[in-house]
Amino acid sequence: KQEVTQIPAALSVPEGENLVLNCSFTDSAIYNLQWFRQDPGKGLTSLLLIQSSQREQTSGRLNASLDKSSGRSTLYIAASQPGDSATYLCAVRGAAGNKLTFGGGTRVLVKP
Amino acid sequence: GAGVSQTPSNKVTEKGKYVELRCDPISGHTALYWYRQSLGQGPEFLIYFQGTGAADDSGLPNDRFFAVRPEGSVSTLKIQRTERGDSAVYLCASSLGAGGYEQYFGPGTRLTVT
């Protein structure tokens, strides 16, 4: 059974610092990995999707890497801003089936 | 364009009652998913539809939970004899199809069972 872990559970940084969020998964037989942002009381906003054949994806200040063999993904957010404060979730789709298995999320606070 | 919509946004019901939660996916998306998110946790998969059929219902916790998608678009999640442990945010997502497509989520329905 796939298990996804995100450490740390919470993170607080001063504005301008780079953010590094970690995601690990136990079964490397994945189809893709998706990073989401969730604001309090809201749904999930997709940030980046990395297919299993890819090593990284970039969008603006966001960069996500994937090391499938070691079961790890890292989300980097450059030059953090207070508006980046949210919970970040990673989710993997297994090679068989279409459901996403989520980690517990990392709650980020960027202080002005 | 319009995203995934869910109604109601909030639902409060008494223990033992029946509830229906509705999801309207992005137009043209053939795959639809239901997830449940408890406070402070990541979402957990409930059921996945490809078209009108439930392709994977392995996440439904018990037979009080049922979902339909009769015309391959709108889906309804039905919960019978609600229990306090059913209180959570129910999230719906859709994607263009099965496979490696991105899943787009709705705002969720917050269900509170008193």
Image (cartoon, rainbow, N blue to C red):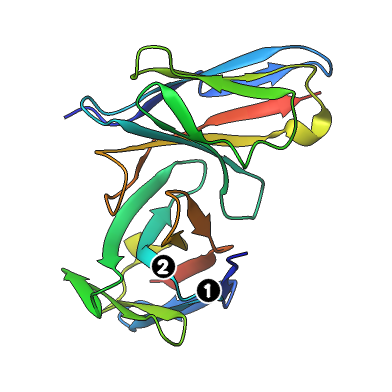
Q: Which of A106 and B82 lies nearest the eye of the viewer?
A: B82
The residue type indicated by label 2 comes to Ile
Mark 1, Cα crowd under 10 Å, few <14 / some 14-19 / many 20+, is some
Pinpoint the chain carrying mark 2: A
The image shows residue A13, relative to residue B106, as above or below, that is: below
The image shows residue B74, relative to residue A1, as above or below, that is: above
Secondary structure of residue under mark 1? loop
In this rendering, the count of numbered labels is 2
Spatial CA span between label 2 and label 1? 7 Å
Mark 2, Cα crowd under 10 Å, few <14 / some 14-19 / many 20+, is some
Q: Please identify the quarter of the rendering in which residue B113 is found.
A: top right
Q: In the drawing, what numbered circle is on residue A30?
A: 2
Secondary structure of residue under mark 2? strand
Q: Which of A88 and B47 lies nearest the eye of the viewer?
A: B47
Identity of the residue drawn at 36% across and 61% down: A34
What is the quadrant of the C terminus of chain B in the image?
top right
Name the side, left or right, on which B16 lies relative to A61.
Answer: right
Q: Please identify the quarter of the rendering in which residue B50 is found.
A: top left
Image coordinates of residue A103 in percent, x first then y, are: 55, 64
The residue at which mark 1 appears reads as A27
The residue type indicated by label 1 comes to Asp
The image shows residue B112, relative to residue B98, as above or below, that is: above
The image shows residue B28, relative to residue A56, as above or below, that is: above
Identity of the residue drawn at 33% across and 27% down: B25
Identity of the residue drawn at 22% across and 27% down: B2
**Is residue A61 at least partly visible in the picture?**
no
Image coordinates of residue B22 in percent, x first then y, are: 48, 18
Q: Which of A37 and B59 lies nearest the eye of the viewer?
A: B59
Mark 2–mark 1 CB contact (< 8 Å): yes
Identity of the residue drawn at 64% across and 55% down: B40
What is the quadrant of the N terminus of chain B in the image?
top left
